[in-house]
Image: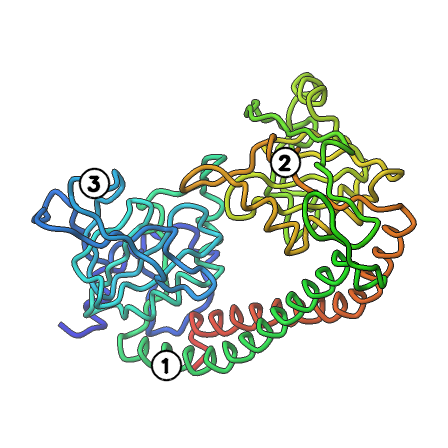
Amino acid sequence: MTQIEQINAVKISDDLPNQSNLSSIPKHWSWVKLGDVCEQVNKVKDFNKDGSFYYLDIGGINNKKNLIESVKEYEWRTAPSRAKQIVRSGDVLFSTVRTYLKNIAKVPLLYDNQIASTGFCIIRPQRNLLNTEYIFYLTLYDKFLAPLNALQVGSSYPAVRNGEVLKQVIPLPPLPEQKKIVEKIEELFSGLDSGVASLQKAKEQLRIYRQSVLAYAFSGKLTGAVKGETKNGELPEGWEWVKLNEVLEVKDGTHDTPKYKGKGIPFITQKNIKNGEFVFDGYNLISKEDHQKFYKRSNVTFNDIIISMIGANRGMSTIVKTKEVFSIKNVGLVKTEEGKLLSKFLDYFFKSEVGQKSILSKSKGGAQQFIGLTELRNWLVPLIPITMQTQIVEEIESRFAGSEALEKAIDDSLIKAELLRQSILKQAFEGKLI
């Protein structure tokens, strides 16, 4: 049987959903369901449970590079409950949790016949019909992901079922053409990746520059302060280390999860603190009654500071720059008083290396580390006269001004690079790249 005949054998022309929405492809290509050109994946019950194994989990995927960057080795007696799928070299691991994050990677030879989490849909191509690299790049294409993103259910861990992934309709050219398409994609992506790497290096250099400015600011060097000693360590003369709650009111948001509503009051969590900025979107809504209950505990208002308390981004702070009414969950709240500590001065200190080291060193927990309210209240911060705080903020912002414009230009270029990447994939899977 020729390959065209093989493709026609799996083509399900009467059963393809939304055929009117399918893009135009060359006549000798076919539309097929992904699952119809994939092999079945064996479960752990079929596996010889001797010795140890490597466990591939979603957390081990670098979704910026789409590579497996870390795995853990387990004995069978300590195997994670989700370790239930046997992978083969050349499989594509497609995370069904938060599909929009693109936690997708190919399995290298090193992890052949190892075990993966049930959080992955394992895509195992029929090699006589489907090229591994071809389907790998196709899963990174936004048009493939869009219907899956829309199908996700769940609030904390929105996900889709494996069956929904395998039901996706994909364009299938003959195998030799798939290989040529992959070669062209990789050729174009190589140049794009080089440019992106240079942009990311420039962005990292900006981050280092900003940290050096903050280090100078909170050592007194920006304002020419004289070095001195305090009971809590070295600080410029006239400065004093104090516990945060000795100067300001420090609280935290509710730890409850109320019922979400179609209309109501915004419910803000630490996902609304992004890159040190307050992002007032993507939130759930709660009833006025729940809001009033939570607001009694943590009455956050304009110009207060909120701080993430859980996970990898714990300690990240931002100033509230909206006068909208909202409630908070699992974030710290510092009620600012401009006559004591300027919100900008305090926020810059929180973002500085010395401020971060101070709070992160007091983290608790194991795999999911957190900062407790007690630790937040005991956070040592520098107390200095308001006039000097104002001068330091002005000095910081004068130095940051040019770097912020440059960072925006870099971010714009990174966005354009991703749009170009998607444009290349669009041409590839519409048969226009070669």
Q: Nearer the viewer, mark 1 or mark 2?
A: 2
Say which residue appears at 35% left-offset and 42% top-offset. Answer: 161
- Using a 10 Å C-alpha cutoff, classify the residue at mark 2 as few (fewer than 14 neighbours), some (14 to 19) or many (20 or more): many
Q: Which residue is mark 3?
A: 78
* Colour mode of the rendering: rainbow
Amino acid type at image mark 2: Leu
Residue 108 picture quarter: bottom left
Q: Nearer the viewer, residue 24 or 343?
A: 343
Q: Nearer the viewer, residue 223 or 72?
A: 223
Q: Nearer the viewer, mark 3 or mark 2?
A: 2
Q: Nearer the viewer, residue 62 or 386?
A: 386
| Secondary element type, mark 1 | helix
Query: Measured from the top left, where is residue 86 in percent x and y?
Result: 19, 52
Amino acid type at image mark 1: Glu
Q: Which residue is mark 1?
A: 183
- Using a 10 Å C-alpha cutoff, classify the residue at mark 3 as few (fewer than 14 neighbours), some (14 to 19) or many (20 or more): few
Q: Quadrant of the N terminus?
A: bottom left
Mark pair 1, 2: CA separation: 53 Å
Say which residue appears at 73% left-offset and 43% top-offset. Answer: 241
Q: Which residue is mark 2?
A: 376
Residue 307 picture quarter: top right
Q: Earlier in the sequence, mark 1 or mark 2?
A: 1
Say which residue appears at 43% left-offset and 58% top-offset. Answer: 144
Question: Which numbered circle lies on residue 385?
Answer: none
- Note whether residue 324 is visible: no
